[in-house]
Amino acid sequence: MPKVEPMTMEISFEAAMERLEKIVAEMESSKLPLEELLVRYEEGIRLVAVCSQQLAAAENRIETLSRSANGKPQSANAESTPDSLKDSKNIKNEEIRLF
């Protein structure tokens, strides 16, 4: 049985996704015995958790950066703002940029 490396936050998101793709391909090949399928499944579950944690951390960082840049939190439904209000915000931003 191959040794499974412990998965931590130290693996990059891209490396984790690449490994997940390989695991899926191996599992879909139907050439692995049941015990190996279980080992791959467990590794995949750990990788999914690592990816989820890294995505959540990235989302929090983006939210923090948005707050810092604007001085207030960005709402997720900014697209639901009426067009007239959006236009007035754009005009104010353009005026500020001109000076």
Image: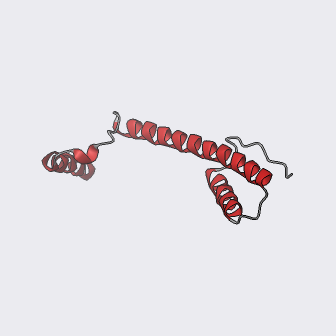
Judging depth in this view, the residue of 55 and 4 nearest the camera is 4
Left or right: 28, with 98 as reference point: right
Q: Residue furthest front?
A: 34
Judging depth in this view, the residue of 18 and 57 nearest the camera is 18
Left or right: 71, with 43 as reference point: left
Residue at 71% x, 62% y: name it.
26
Q: How many marks?
A: 0
Residue at 33% x, 41% y: name it.
76
The colouring scheme, among rainbow, by chain, secondary structure or one colour, is secondary structure
Left or right: 64, with 86 as reference point: right
Q: Residue furthest right?
A: 1
- Provide residue 17's location: percent of width, then percent of height: 62, 55
Residue at 39% x, 36% y: name it.
67
Judging depth in this view, the residue of 92 and 11 nearest the camera is 11
Residue at 74% x, 53% y: name it.
37
Figure check: 67 above or below 35? above
Figure check: 26 above or below 87? below
- Provide residue 53's location: percent of width, then percent of height: 58, 40
Q: Residue furthest top?
A: 72
- Provide residue 30's location: percent of width, then percent of height: 71, 64
- Provide residue 93's location: percent of width, then percent of height: 24, 48
- Residue 32 location, quadrant: bottom right
